[in-house]
Image: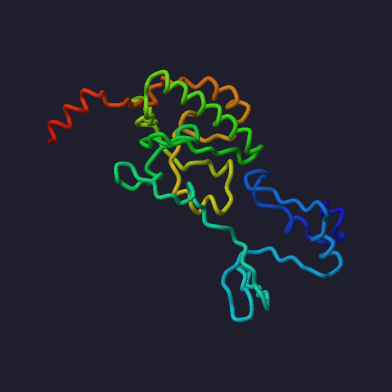
Amino acid sequence: MARENLPPDFDIDKHFTPRYRPWQQRVAFMPNGDLFASIREGQASIVTDEIEEFTANGIRLKSGETVEADLIITATGFNLSVLGDIPFSIDDKPLDLADSVTYRGMMFTGVPNLVWVFGYFRASWTLRADMVGDFVCRLLKHMQRKGARRITPQLRPEDRDMPLSSWTDPEDFNPGYLLRDLHKLPKRGNKREWQHTQDYWREKDEFPAIDLDDPAFDYGYPEPVAQRKVSQATRT
């Protein structure tokens, strides 16, 4: 579409060919071609480079070129808000998600009764959101049958020495806003249970088959009434 709408001598490889593969970052589309039309008609121009610094009269680029500007609109991305910046705590101790390991991109080791509904980067968000919702319903029914009030993901003995890395593989998805804040997110392991994958075709079969009695799940049960009375008497 760019080639069809821009002059033959326009350098499309430089200005409209990203350095990343499709879906490593979100692909931008201009269905009505308005930007192309503005360039073609001389109403707009494109400069592709990296910003070195702001100057009194505009922007100096890494190439040394200076772009003069009366007005600069910064659109360099945003700061990631992990879990809505909610200050979670466990037993009055602040929770740092970066200290946990993700369980299939929806739960975190050491964090009880919390499921993060997170979709796919490169497919419909709701595909994964629906699967997570189905899992939660199945899990709640399972806990009800067991009489459990708490579930906490935990690394199994065979998982405790596995290598850990950043929450997502930059080869899968690498926009700046995510790479800048990977240090805020849970870690991932080298086994599928401990990863947030982008593989819908496998996860659609894996999620319904998750063993809810897997040792990766630590269930907690209400304290028996008699035991609570004894504990209360002892404290008194």
Quarter location, residue 185: top left
Colouring mode (rainbow / by chain / secondary structure / one colour): rainbow
Q: Is residue 197 left or right of residue 213?
A: right
Q: Is residue 224 left or right of residue 79?
A: left
Above or below: residue 17 compared with residue 190: below
Q: Nearer the viewer, residue 161 or 232?
A: 232
Quarter location, residue 217: top left
Q: Which residue is at a point 45% across and 37% down the rendered structure image? A: 188
Q: Position of residue 221 (x, y in %)?
A: 32, 25
Q: Which residue is at a point 47% across and 22% down the rendered structure image? A: 141
Q: Which residue is at a point 83% across and 51% down the rendered structure image? A: 1
In what quadrant of the picture does the C terminus appear? top left
Q: Nearer the viewer, residue 112 or 236?
A: 236
Q: Nearer the viewer, residue 64 or 31?
A: 31
Outermost residue, bottom side: 56
Q: Is residue 62 left or right of residue 211?
A: right
Q: Position of residue 178 (x, y in %)?
A: 53, 50
Q: Position of residue 161 (x, y in %)?
A: 35, 31
Q: Position of residue 131 (x, y in %)?
A: 58, 29
Above or below: residue 35 compared with residue 138: below
Q: Nearer the viewer, residue 48 or 155?
A: 155
Q: How many numbered discs?
A: 0
Q: Is residue 185 left or right of residue 229?
A: right
Q: Which residue is at a point 48% across and 48% down the rendered structure image? A: 82
